[in-house]
Image (spheres, rainbow, N blue to C red):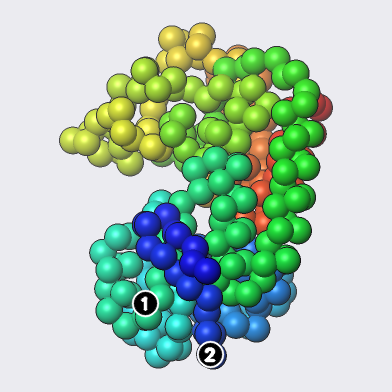
Amino acid sequence: MTWQDAAGVLHGPAAGEVRIASLVPSVTELLFTLGLGPQVVARTGFCIHPEPVVRAVAKVGGTKDVKLERLRALAPTHVVVNIDENRRETVDEIRGFVPHVIVTHPCAPEDNLALYRLLGGIFGRVAEAESLCEAMEFELAQVRGRIWPERKVLYAIWQDPWMTVSRDTYISRMLALVNWQTWPSAQAMPEACVDGDCSRPNTADTRYPSFRWSEGLVREIDLVLLSSEPYRFTEAHVDALERQIGREVLLIDGEMVSWYGSRAVEGVGYLARFAAA
């Protein structure tokens, strides 16, 4: 059998000594959940789950600044990367010395099913993958079996500059499970700068647009969610922003909403409880 990754590459079953490098935090956790921890030989510094066992795995830099010589020295047979998390030029270099590069790109909660089966199939953990699929399908059925009132939500991932998520992201599609529609809409990209650089304005393809608070923006939203990651928003930020804009502001667990992989099973249930509170 073969399994097709997000780049369209077909992968057969891993054979011989398997040495896996994961450059994606949520995938690292998934590999351990599938029982592949002993085969994981490299991770990024952002791969922090599952604690504490992941600490024993060698670090090879960050998701965007992979230490290629360190990775090469660990001699992985397989490297798992992600289209959003890792730089394309880095992945191209890795292909020069790693036999198998597996590209992932879940864009919606249901995409986790294919991710589980992709890694479970390649690495001989089919039963474990199917168990995760059953758990995810159950959680999705539970949340989709309820009627959720629509709310217009701004999900903030950064400040200085303020940044949010477009509709074309995993986070936005997770929130849509409970009928929380993220601002901006696909037709109304904010007139702001990307990463604080006003020479590169937001466009229809900007996945993580920057924005500026204004009375007009506030009128368009019902709720602001401040994510606990990648920016470490706290309750102090919640209180300050709520006083500033006069709208409900809540702190949300960013890992539960943005991490695909095995954490997504718990994440769907977490989101349903959060929205119902």
Residue farthest along the front direction in this orientation: 1
Residue 124: quadrant of the picture: bottom right
Q: Position of residue 98 (x, y in %)?
A: 37, 80
In the rendering, at what x and y percent does residue 276 appear? 79, 26
**Does the residue at mark 1 contact the one at mark 2 (Cβ under 8 Å)?**
no
> Position of 55 compared to 68: left or right?
right
Q: Amino acid at mark 2?
A: Gly
Left or right, 234 with reference to 137: left
Q: Residues within 10 Å of mark 1 (few under 14, many from 20)?
A: some
State the image coordinates of residue 46 (x, y, percent, origin top left). 53, 64
Mark 2 crowdedness (10 Å alpha carbons): few <14, some 14-19, many ≥20: few
The residue depicted at 72 percent of the width and 65 percent of the height is 128
Picture residue at 39% right of the left edge, 27% below the top: 211
Residue 67: assigned label: 1
Q: How many marks?
A: 2
Label for residue 16? 2
Q: Say which amino acid is labelled 1.
A: Lys
Quarter of the figure that contains the C terminus: top right
- The quadrant holding residue 207 is top left
Residue 176 vs 174, above or below: the answer is: above
Foreground residue among 239 and 49: 49
Is 235 rendered above or below residue 241?
A: below
